[in-house]
Image (tube, grey):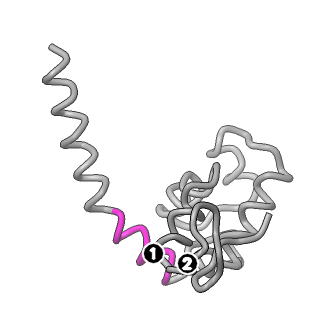
Amino acid sequence: MKTPLPFEPVRGSQSGVAIMAVFDLLGRKWNMRILWELGAGPLSFRALQERCDAMSPSVLNSRIKQLTEARLLQTTVEGYALTELGVSLMATLDPLRAWSAEWAAQITQQSR
């Protein structure tokens, strides 16, 4: 499966607009989970696989390749780690995490 990148058509958009590439990349199964798990620091392949509910090695390899091609992951002596761009992406998503907690609280209040 081709890695979604800016300036190229992606699922749901032929425009090449970078935000559409990001949405496609992050919307692919396991990619956000991998980024999330690596947010705490580098992990070996096996440790990353265990933290991702023991996903198959072939799927993990495929996702690592995509995220590396997108310049969000890198290989280090300790294993896989976020690049500076990957760290920046996760920091950018922090306000969305706060918003989602507020959303969940409102949904919970409305359910009562």
Please tell me how many numbered marks the rendered image carries: 2
Residue drawn at 50 percent across, 57 percent down: 36
Q: Is 86 covered by the magenta stretch?
A: yes
Q: Residues within 10 Å of mark 2 (few under 14, many from 20)?
A: few
Mark nearer the viewer, 1 or 2 = 2
Residue drawn at 46 percent across, 74 percent down: 19
Residue 87's tag is 1
49 relative to 57 in the view: left or right? left
Q: Is residue 38 above or below residue 103?
A: below
What is the spatial separation of the Cα atoms under label 1 and label 2, in whole angstroms?
26 Å
**104 and 87: which one is in front?**
104
Residue drawn at 22 percent across, 40 percent down: 103
2 relative to 107 in the view: left or right? right
The stretch in magenta equals: 85-93
Disc 1 marks a residue whose amino acid type is Val
Disc 2 marks a residue whose amino acid type is Ser
